[in-house]
Image (spheres, rainbow, N blue to C red):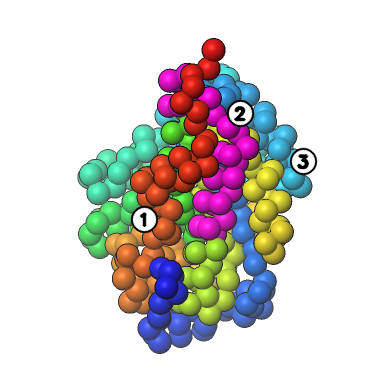
Amino acid sequence: MTRGAQFFCHCLVVAALVSTPGFAADNAPGHRRIALTFDDAPRSDGGFFSGEERTIRLIRELERAGVEEAMFFVKTAHIRSETDRQRLRRYAQAGHRLANHSHSHLWLYRTEADEYVADIAKASRILADFEHYDPFYRFPFLDEGRTPEKRDAVRKALADQGLSHGYVTVDNYDWYLAGRVKMALRDGLQVNRRALRRVYLEHILESVAFYDRIALDVLGRSPHHVLLLHENDLAALFIGDLVRALREAGWEIVGAREAYTDPIAEILPDTTFNGQGRVAALAHAAGTKPRALVQGSEDEQVLDALLERNQVFSNKKRP
């Protein structure tokens, strides 16, 4: 039996969710919506594209796929030049949204709360100058701290700064796949893009299905999901294919601002197990064991085997 097939929920959590205003109206089982979000913008050059080329291609492919609004969570330390600022303006001018992903991309569990909160505020000040900036904050590494005291101190600071939690519901390892590709290209290896596309789509779609099954078990419904992606070359290459595959699987693509109106946005899970996103955190708070809340291919060895099985990288170096 696969992980995700053995979930259960505590009556107290379910009662709290069901009693939340607006629970039933647009969130009945079978009505599936998902938002696209991209972390770490504006990222530096990749193996296939320069940063500027990647931005242009992402905007073009999102438009071709009919996605009117995606959300880009900005690491403001990445804004090092006018070109970087212009890339963010391009996203905004295309109708997409910008949000806060911190200035320095710190691990909360390794950082004093005061220093961490100051880093968030610094990013907010920088982002305030950009059009289409929305006051959502996403924790780097999805790390909300490993003690309730630190977690709650930062949650309070976010509220004091007028920031809402830019949580995810679907985690994945797209960052690892992108890193493997960049290393292969750096080493002069050939990359089979068709095979890479197959691996990328399989991994992301399995992640979406996995976390939706958890949601159905713990909530009794499919919430407005928020997909975590990164502003990397694989997104630029395959976002159109991913959108088509999601729609074929019955998903409607919505903006993150709409997704964050789901009732789960108002429920802060009483757990420090937050690194797999909001749905997994709710399931953990309801009693599900952590090992059942991690999708099987969120594992470097599994992905390495998948890349090898699909012969994504050729041992023959490029001439």
Determine the CA span between mark 1 and mark 2.
27 Å
Which residue is under mark 1? 275
Relative side of 285 to 227, left or right: left
Is residue 48 depicted above or below 122 in this figure? above
Q: Earlier in the sequence, mark 1 or mark 2?
A: 2
Query: In this rendering, is residue 198 above or below 272?
Result: above
* Residue 134 disc label: none
Identify the main secondary structure in magenta: helix
Q: Nearer the viewer, residue 238 or 272?
A: 238
- On the image, numbered disc 2 is attached to which residue? 54
Please report the residue visible at 35 percent of the width from the left and 74 percent of the height from the top.
Answer: 288
In the shown orientation, is residue 41 left or right of residue 183?
right
Residue in view at x 35 percent, y 70 percent: 284
Q: Are marks 1 and 3 in contact (CB under 8 Å)?
A: no
Magenta run includes residue 206:
yes
Asked whether the viewer can see residue 44, the reply is no
Magenta residues? 183-208
- Which circle marks residue 64 in the picture? 3
Mark sitting earlier along the chain (1/3): 3
What kind of residue is marked 2?
Arg
Picture quarter with the N terminus: bottom left
Residue 97 in the image, given as x and y percentages of width and height = 62, 43
Q: Which three-letter amino acid code belongs to the residue tagged 3?
A: Arg
